[in-house]
Image: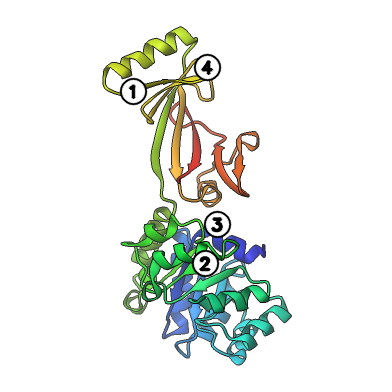
Amino acid sequence: MNPTIETIGTLGIVPVIKIESAEKAVPLIEALSSGGLPCAEFTFRTDAAEDSIRAVAKAYPDFLVGAGTVINRELAERAVDSGARFIVAPGFNPSVVDWCLSKGIPVMPGVNTPSDIEAALERGLTILKFFPAEASGGVAMLDALSGPFHQVSFIPSGGIDLANLAEYARRPNVHAIGGSWMVKTALIESGDWTQVSSLAREAVTAVQGFAFAHVGINSPDEGTARETSSFFANLGFPQKDGASSFFNDTVIEVMKSPFRGTMGHLGIRCWNVERSLKFLERFGFKPVPETVKREGGRVTLAYLDREVGGFAVHLTRAK
């Protein structure tokens, strides 16, 4: 996978920006970066898009700046000349796609029909914009497309905000989500960068889908583990005897011998383990390589390399 497109996937959110003044571009992306979103798509819906891309690319070369609403080849050329590192289009325009591919520029054309998807696959594209998402059937349409097009992942955009973000983020065929709720025109015009950072931070956390899975309690031996597990069984948590542990319901695991963590371990669910591991890097956590488990090419479980409150922590992919 192209590194740029891969980075978009690990971020999980692509702010879609309509900007009227290029002078606002740099402070805007500084606010997004502060909120944990070093990526943005400036749409060619205004005359300021081209200059905004140029200003951002010059001031912050490492910021992942792209161009959206690229509806013809001329706009694609202007966007790339300005410093855009990826191109997003609302529809499938063969001349735009073919030009980007000839120049090695990552391109994500918009699709919402099987025919458009087949045209993209014919050109080797498997990460596509799903637009307009809500008007095109939303998550029900994505679920329907996952059958015949299992090799395709989408970046849905259009009608998505924090209220329905989870419905999309939990889908296995969603690569990332495009949205403008954290970069609304009123926020940009007023220069409310603190609110932009806050909304970006909120979105980056929300797209992870973190939820408590279970707690693992270490025991010195099987006898002690049985006694501990029986206590929880008496409280109404059904006991199940396993090879290395007792499980009470699905939320308490009592280890028959000492395991990871000084006191035990905590299981945390998320929608995309790879994405959440990247998110946790900013807090100093890394995965323990020998604990990483994969299924169908995707990471399903990974322990972190640091304890929290005496507990080891592992991420597990929600189903």
Q: What is the C-alpha distance between the residues marked 1 and 3?
A: 38 Å
What residue does disc 3 label? 10
- Whichever of labels 1 and 2 marks the residue nearer the N terminus, that label is 2
Question: How far is mark 4 from mark 1, CA to CA?
Answer: 22 Å
Query: What is the three-letter code of the residue carrying label 3?
Result: Thr
The answer to whether residue 154 is left or right of residue 246 is right
Q: Which residue is mark 4?
A: 258
Q: Is residue 53 left or right of residue 226?
A: right
Res 154 label: 2
Circle 4: element type: loop
Q: Which residue is mark 1?
A: 238
Where is the N terminus found, in terms of image quarters?
Answer: bottom right
Q: Residues within 10 Å of mark 2 (few under 14, many from 20)?
A: many
| Count of numbered circles on the image | 4
Question: How far apart are labels 1 and 2 at the CA level?
Answer: 40 Å
C-alpha separation, residue under disc 3 versus residue under disc 2: 13 Å
Answer left or right for 61 relative to 201: right
